[in-house]
Amino acid sequence: MTYVDDFPGEARVVRTAFAVAFASIGLGGALGVLQALFRTGYSRSLFSAVDYYSVLTAHGVLMALVFTTFFIVGLFAWGVTRSLDTGFRDLRFTWGWLALMTLGTLLAFVSILGGIVGFIPTHAAVLYTFYAPLEASPTFYLGLALLVVGSWGAGVDYVLTLRDWRADNPDERIPLQTFMAVSTMLLWFVCTLGVAVEVVVFLLPWSLGLIPRVDPLLTRTLFWYFGHAVVYFWLLPAYFVWYTIFPKLSGGRLFSDPLARVVFVLFLVLSTPVGVHHQYGDPGLSQGLKFVQMTSTYFILLPSLLTAFTVVASMEHGARQRGGEGRFGWLRALPWENPSFSGIALAGLAFAASGFGGMVNAGLNVNALVHNTMWVPGHFHLTVGTAVALTFMAITYWLLPQLTGKRLRLRTLAAVQPYLWFVGMVFMSNAMHRIGLAGVPRRTSEPQYEQVIFNTPIASIGELHLQTVGGAFLLFASLLCFLAVVGSTWLGERGAKPLAVNGHIPSALSGPEHSPRVLDDFRVWVALTVLLLLIAYGPPLAAMVQNGLFAPGSAPIPA
Amino acid sequence: MEIHRLEKIWIAVSLVFIVGLVASIVYGVAGMGVGTVGDTGQQLDPNALEETRFADPGGHWASDDHYVVTVVARQFLFQPGSQEPVMVPANTTVTLYVTSPDVVHGFDVVGTHLNAMVIPGQVTKLTTEFDEPKSYGIVCHEYCGAGHQSMAGQLVVVPADELPRNESGAAGNTSGANATSESATASADASPAVAPPEVSA
Ligand code: HEM
Ligand SMILES: [Cu+2]
Ligand SMILES: [Cu+2]
C-alpha cells in the first residue's frame, strides 16, 4: 500500500505543506536571478537600487524561512506517521498549525511587498535578519511570529503521536525516522526561543510604539542565538533523508542505526551554544566568549564528519550489492540516472565542499577576511541552497508519487534537473566566493564605488560577474524543470499501474538493539542542552541586561 | 554498542583534526597577535554622541607612538572617511574607535583584516599597524537602509611625520587630509586618553 492510501488525511497535510514550499522556492528563485542581474549591473531596469532591499528581504524570507520550514514540517509529518505507522491524533489540530504557518507567511510576505507596491501601506526592507533599529511594519514581525508558533504546533503534533505510540509499545526502540524528527523539533523549540523573545518581547511592541527603545546588541544576540541553530534545523531533515532513505536509493542499507542517533543527539546538544560565531565582528562581546563558542563550533564538525562517513559507507555498500567492484569502480554501479539518488549525492558533494569554507568562516580571526562579503552568500548557497534544497527537491521525486498515488511524469527532465542545479551552483557559488575574497560586500544593490577598488587575484570582477549571472540562469532553469515535473505529476491522472517506488525502508546493518536505551530518553538530552545553553549564553546576556533591558537603546528607524 | 573499526579510526582522525583547527586559531591569536573585536566595556547613548569622544570625530596622537582615530558611521557616511579620508601614520600603532548614532553598519577596510560591525550603543575598537603609505577603500558591508550601496570611504596611510602633533604630544586633531590648526584646538580639551562617558558600568 502507498502512503496516500494508508493515511489519506496526513498525505493531504504533507502535500499542502509542500505546495507552499514549492511556491516559495519558485518565486524566491526568480527574485534570486533578479538580484544577480542587479548586483552585477547586467540589468537594473526592473526596480530601483532601494527596492533591491525589499526584493532581497523577500528572497531571504521565502527561501531561508518559508521554503525550508514548510518542507520540513511536511517531510517530518510523513516520516513520523510512516515510521510509527499511526496517523496524527486529531487532524484538526494538524490543519490548525499549518494554517497558522500559512497565515504568518502571507502576512510577512505582503508586508515586504508593501515596500515596493504603493497601495500596500507596509514596509519591511529589513532583510531576513531584521536587525534593530531598522524597523519593519508590525505585521512583518507578527507574520514571522505566527510562522514560528505554527511550526511549534508541528513539533507538538509529532511528540504527542510518539507519546501515544510509546504507550502501546513500551518496550520498543523509537523508530529512527521519528527519533530524528523529534530530536530536530526539540532543537527547533530550544533555538526559536531566542528569536521568539526577540520578536515578541522587543521588536513587535517597539514597532507598535509600546516601548520606545530596544538594545541593538541584545536583540541581535538573541537573533544569533537562533540564527546558527536554525541552520541545523535545515540540515538535519536533509540528514534524515541521507540516513534513512538514501541508503535504499543506493541499493543497500544504512550502516549503523545507533551512530545515527548519536549524531542527532550531538546536534541537539551542541547546536545552540555556537551562535556567537556570527558575531565575531561585533563590539560589546568579549573575545573570550567568542573563543569559547568558536571551540564548540569546531566540535560540531564531528557529527557532520560522522555523517560523511556513514553516507559514503552506505553508498558503497549499496553499490556493492548492485555488483559494483574495485576501489572506486563501485561508484559506476550507482543509479546516477535516478534523480532522487543523483540529487542527494550531488547535495552531499556540495556540502563537503562547503565544509572547507565553513572552517574558514568559523575561525575567530580568519573570519575577518570574509565577514559580510559576497563569500558568505557563496558559502550558504552551497549549504542551505544546495545541500539542503537539492536534497529536498531530490526526495520529492521519490515522495510525491507516494503522496499522490501518481507515477512521476517528465522523467527525463527530472533526471537532468539535479545536474543542472549542481553545475549552476558551482558557477554562481564559486564566483561569489571569489568576489567576496576581493572584499565586495554582500547585501548591496550596487557594490561599485568611486573610492574603493576590489582586487581579484585571478579572473576579473567582470568575468566573475558573468559566472554569477550564468550560474543564476542555470539554477533558475533547473528550478523550472523541477516545478514542471512536480506540477505535471500532481495534476496528472492516477494510473492503473502500480507505483515505481514504495515507502518500505530496510533496517540498518547494525540495528538499534545494541545501543544504550538512554539514547532514546529525550529528557536527558534536553536537560543537557539547557545546561550548556545557560553556561554559554547566561553570562553575556546577563551582562547585556545589567544596565536595563532597553539600554543602550535605539528608537525605530523605518526601512 | 558496536562501532565498526574503520569508523573508530575515522572518529579519532576527526577529533585530531578538530583539535588541530582550534590550535591553529589559538596560534594565530596568541602567537601572531591577530585577534578580533572584543568588549571595550564602553557603552554610550547613541542619541547623545556629542557628550562622548565622538563629538568631534577624527585623528590625533594619543602619545608619541600611538595614533587614535574616532569615526562615526552614520546613514550613509563615514565621518571621517567618506567626505575626507581617514588619515593614519605608517609604522605606528593605530587605534580606531567606531560607533553609530543610528543603525547597524559595517566597517571593512578592504584588503586588510580590519573588518567589524558598528552597533549603536557600542564602541568598536580596532588596533593595527600599517607598514607603508598606501590608500585603502572602506566599505559599509552591513545593510543600513536605502543609501547603503553608497556608503564607502577611504583610509590613507601617510608617513608619520605628515600628521601634525601639538607640543604636548598628547592631543591634537586632524580630521582628514587638510587638517587645520583650528580643528586641532577645538578638540584639545577633549583629551583622547579619557574614556567616553558610559551609560553605566
Ligand atoms: C535560483 C537560485 C538562486 C539564485 C539565483 C540566488 C541568488 C542570490 C543572490 C545573488 C544573493 C545575494 C544578494 C546580496 O547579498 O546582495 C542571494 C542571497 C540569499 N539567498 Fe539566494 N539564490 C538562489 C537560491 C537560493 C536558495 C535555494 C536559498 C535557500 C534555500 C537561498 C537563500 C538565500 C539567502 C538566505 C540569501 C541572503 C539574503 C540576505 O543577505 O539577507 N537562495 N541569493
Ligand atoms: Cu553559524
Ligand atoms: Cu551600510
Image (cartoon, grey):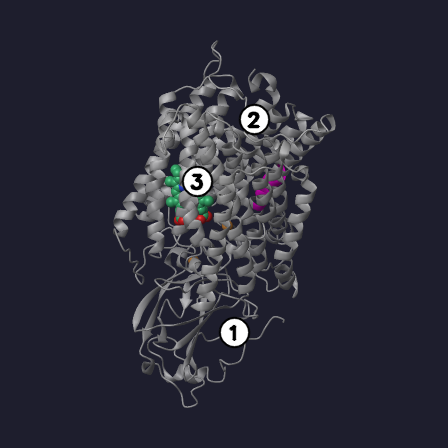
Q: In this figure, which residue is indicated by the disc labeled 2?
A: A507
Q: Is residue B174 visible?
A: yes
**What is the chain letter for disc 1?**
B
Question: Compared with residue A265, is residue B154 higher up or lower down, i.e. above or below?
Answer: below
For the C terminus of chain B, give its image quadrant: bottom right
Q: Nearer the viewer, mark 1 or mark 3?
A: 3
Q: Nearer the viewer, mark 2 or mark 1?
A: 2
| SS for dot 3 | helix
Mark 3 beta carbon near ligand 1 (under 8 Å): yes
Query: Which residue is drawn at the image coordinates 56% and 15% (left, top)?
Result: A1
Three-letter code, disc 2: Ser
Residue closest to the eye, A554 or A333: A333
* Residues in magenta, as a range: A141-150
State how far apart marks 2 and 3 are (Cα): 30 Å
Quarter holding residue B81: bottom left
Three-letter code, disc 1: Glu
As drawn, the label of residue A385 is 3
Quarter holding residue A536: bottom right
Q: Nearer the viewer, mark 2 or mark 3?
A: 2
